[in-house]
Amino acid sequence: MNDTYDYGLWSMVILNSAIFIFFAFSFVKPKSSTDWRSLGVFSAFIVALFTEMYGFPLTIYFLSGWLAETYPEVNFFAHENGHLLHTFFGFKGDAHWDPFHIASMVFIVAGFFISVSYTHLTLPTIYSV
């Protein structure tokens, strides 16, 4: 078993969270308690996002018992095995080029084009009144 550990970059979690929260704080400049509450919710989201990205993936944490029993030879702390569908379906090679990852990239690009075309088609009709 490979003993690499690609998570646990807590300094990255703290640094990126601080940068994003400071950036949001510099634009929002909260004055009322509602503004502070909204900034707090945004800050919690940012901390959770970067904890998931660099700290420890929550999905792997919740499934760790089952994963260890079902796939005892797989090290889920390695980045390549963190792509669970890639591992579950037994794909070999780079996880970034499996069908699920390619399909997700196609959906993201298609969603972008749909969003842009929808805005392009509907804004003239809204403002032509």
Image (cartoon, rainbow, N blue to C red):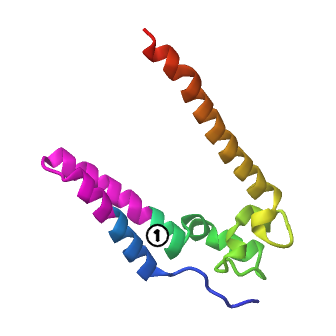
Q: Using the image, determine if residue 74 lies above or below residue 34.
A: below
Residue 39 sits inside the magenta stretch: yes
Q: Residue at x 33, y 59 (%)?
A: 43
Q: SS for tag 1?
A: helix
Which residues lie in the magenta part? 21-48
Q: Residue at x 51, y 67 (%)?
A: 52
Q: Amino acid at mark 1?
A: Thr
Rendered location of residue 14, percent (x, y): 38, 75
Relative horizontal placement of residue 108, taking residue 30 as reference (left or right):
right
Could you say where residue 9 lies in the image, as x and y percent from the top left? 49, 81
Q: Position of residue 57 (x, y in %)?
A: 56, 69
Image coords of residue 24 (percent x, y): 30, 57
Using a 10 Å C-alpha cutoff, classify the residue at mark 1 as few (fewer than 14 neighbours), some (14 to 19) or many (20 or more): many
Vertical order, 114 against 97 (above or below)? above
Q: Nearer the viewer, residue 22 or 35?
A: 22
Position above or below: 63 against 14: above
Judged left or right of residue 69, residue 29 is left
* Residue that carries the numbered disc 1 in the rendered image: 51
Which residue appears at 31% of the width and 53% of the height?
41
